[in-house]
Image (tube, rainbow, N blue to C red):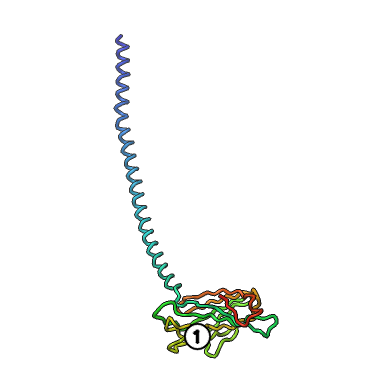
Amino acid sequence: MAGRRRHANRHTRSQEGRGADSGPTRAQIGAGTIVILVAVLIVAATTAGVLFNVTDVLQSRADLTGEAVTAEVDSPLTVVAVTGRVDQTADPRRLTDVRVIVSASQAPASVDLRRATAIVETPATVEEIEYSAAGATVGETFSVEALADSDSSAPVITETTDQFAVVIETPPLGVHDRLGVRLQLESGATERIQIRVPERIRTESAVSLR
């Protein structure tokens, strides 16, 4: 009996010892987990703050870029019409003259067409031409004719009522040929016109192209 009691007592002490040892261990594990969790939260918060700052910077830059692009793209010109003249002596008939009729898109207006350039694209060529008061020549110059000009300001558009024709001599173009014109102002604003020669050039001396 005494031996059994001593054995039972040792067993009890052993269990008590293990219980006493496990308490600090669990506390240490719990404290470690909390430290790791706090560190993760701090890193996450810091990362989020950096991302928010980067997002704000990118948004500000995007806004500025958008304003700059808008300022560059907005054109003070309005294309009223595009017409063409036909060489009736050619067989078959050919389009040889394009007139881009423009006016001011808003007041006050001040568009100096002398400082503009025109890029003329045909299936075979791409030419950059400039203004000439002497008249238009193929691949070299364009001219300006005043259709409505109350203050005789041509080739400078000063009123919304002004209407000028930008005259471009083209290589001979046949039915269904394509022509592209980019009228670029000194400010960087550009008007783009795409033309496809209509079948009407076979019977008419002047045709509407737009």
Residue at 32% over, 36% down:
30
Residue at 29% over, 10% down:
2
Q: Residue furthest bottom?
A: 134
Badge 1, how many Cα within 10 Å: few under 14, some, many 20+? few
Q: Is residue 50 left or right of residue 96?
A: left
Query: Which quarter of the rendering shows the N terminus?
Result: top left
Disc 1 target residue: 147
Point out residue 23 in the picture as x, y percentages from the top left corner.
30, 30
Query: Dividing the picture into quarters, in which one does residue 169 lie?
Result: bottom right
Query: Dividing the picture into quarters, in which one does residue 35 lie?
Result: top left
Count the numbered circles shown. Answer: 1
Point out residue 51 in the picture as x, y percentages from the top left corner.
38, 55
Q: Is residue 161 above or below residue 176?
A: below
Task: Pick whichever, 160 or 4, lies toward us.
Answer: 160
Query: Which quarter of the rendering shows the C terminus?
Result: bottom right
Residue at 41% over, 77% down:
106
Q: Residue furthest right?
A: 91
Q: Is residue 4 left or right of residue 187?
A: left
Q: Residue furthest front?
A: 203
Point out residue 202 in the picture as x, y percentages from the top left corner.
66, 79
Q: Amino acid at mark 1?
A: Leu
Q: Is residue 9 above or below residue 200?
A: above
